[in-house]
Amino acid sequence: MTLRSDAHHWGTIAKSFHWVVALAILGNGVFGLCMDLAGNPMRKINWLALHKSIGLTVLALMLLRLAWRWRDGRPREELAPRWQMLASRIVHLLLYLLALALPLSGWWFNSVTGKPLQFFKLFNLPALAAKDDALRHFSHALHEYLFWFLVLVLVAHVGAALKHHVFDGDDVLRRMLPFGKSRNDKGGNP
């Protein structure tokens, strides 16, 4: 397994970014939805602080992922009808945009509430906007709707990967699995 991607396989770094960011976003989204289950106000404050820090980590990882993606190679696209290739590009673009917009909208929501934003209690980040009670509910709703839109796009992404794997029998899914080998590999990656 190589660090960089080539014409046939995604590299270890690209795969790592993919899976770590995906799990962090989904885990933090579920965590965010469960914060209302916190038994007492202090626990909810601590959970909210952790949710924000994980979101900031996702933002940093996405920026690193974009930088790596810009410099890294990429496997050739599997042959597919033109509409599927276009749909794939649109879904991937939406996933990247939403993975950036979601933590940024959370940062904006935190800013308009006028609360400090700490990164794992290590340091504070600057506000993206001034405190504005009129925008508080809108910014929260935007953050939540972006999450649900991301979930819908993710369902399309996973569904397409499974369709390629189960019905088309190609390597689209195998190339991104952490230990996936191409059906054409005999004993490992070239």
Image: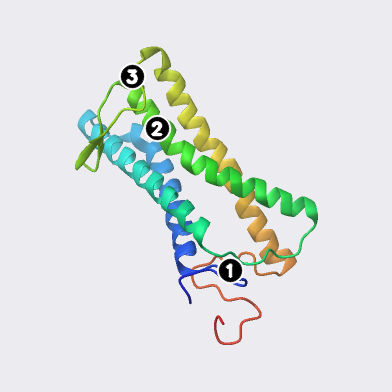
The mark lying in front, picked from 2 and 3, is 3
Q: Say which label, 1 or 3, has the lower sequence index.
A: 3
Quarter location, residue 158: bottom right
Of residues 9 and 71, the one drawn nearer to the viewer in this rendering: 71
What residue is drawn where x is 51% and y is 63%? 72
- Residue 16: percent from left, percent from top: 44, 62
- Residue 137: percent from left, percent from top: 43, 19
Quarter location, residue 108: top left
Residue 39 visible in rendering: no
Is label 3 in a helix, a strand or a loop?
Answer: loop
Circle 2 packing at 10 Å, graded few (<14), some (14-19), many (20+), is many
Circle 3 packing at 10 Å, graded few (<14), some (14-19), many (20+), is few
**Cα–Cα gap, marks 1 and 2:** 32 Å
Q: Which image quarter is the C terminus in?
A: bottom right
Q: Say which label, 1 or 2, has the lower sequence index.
A: 2
Question: Which residue matches tag 3?
Answer: 130
Circle 1 packing at 10 Å, graded few (<14), some (14-19), many (20+), is some
Q: Amino acid at mark 3?
A: Ala
Q: Amino acid at mark 2?
A: Gly
Question: Which residue matches tag 2?
Answer: 106
Question: Which residue matches tag 1?
Answer: 175
Q: Relative to residue 185, is residue 35 depicted above or below?
A: above
Q: Relative to residue 39, is residue 23 depicted above or below?
A: below
Residue 5 - label: none
